[in-house]
Image (tube, rainbow, N blue to C red):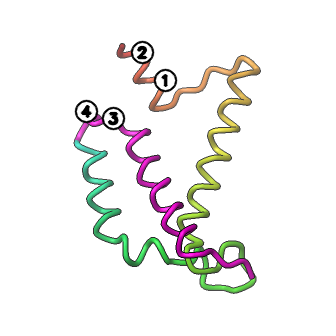
Amino acid sequence: MKKLTAEQIQENWNKLIQLIKDTFPEDYPNDRREKLLKMYHYFEDRMSVAPASGKAAYHNAMVGGYVEHVLHVTDCALQIKKLWESDGCLLYTSDAADEEDS
């Protein structure tokens, strides 16, 4: 089973918090950014070390696996979005809505 070091767990946590900050600007409607950051900081002690699964045979079922899993899923989703856009597909996403408002 894969094991993450304490440094890797902290680095992944920092990446997740930065991802939230980068995804949701400070002026995002309904204070979503601040609410997300408040929730993640409240649960940091538990969430940063949580496994993605309680079943050892499943992926990321190790200490720090949940955050690593979230980062992988987000990265894959962004890659798929770029792939569709490179083929001319118009996707309606929150960042597309932000561009229309500008």
Rendering coords of residue 22 (x, y %): 42, 39
- Determine whether label 2 and label 4 are within 8 Å by CB: no
- Of helix, strand and loop, which one carries label 1? helix
Q: Which residue is mark 1?
A: 96
User: Mark 3 or 1, which is nearer the eye?
Assistant: 3
Q: Is residue 28 magenta?
A: yes
Question: For the magenta stretch, what is the residue range?
Answer: 1-30
- Of helix, strand and loop, which one carries label 2? helix
Q: Which mark is residue 27?
A: 4
Q: CA distance from mark 3 to mark 2?
A: 16 Å
Q: What is the three-letter code of the residue carrying label 4?
A: Asp
| N-terminal label among 3 and 1 | 3
Quadrant of the image for the C terminus?
Answer: top left
| N-terminal label among 1 and 4 | 4
Q: What is the three-letter code of the residue carrying label 2?
A: Glu
Q: Residue at x 53, y 75 (%)?
A: 6
Q: CA distance from mark 2 to mark 4?
A: 16 Å
Q: CA distance from mark 3 to mark 4?
A: 5 Å
Rendering coords of residue 14 (x, y %): 45, 57
Residue at the extreme front of the image, as rendered: 7
Vertical position of residue 62 compared to residue 80: above or below: below
Q: Which residue is mark 3?
A: 25
Quadrant of the image for the N terminus?
Answer: bottom right
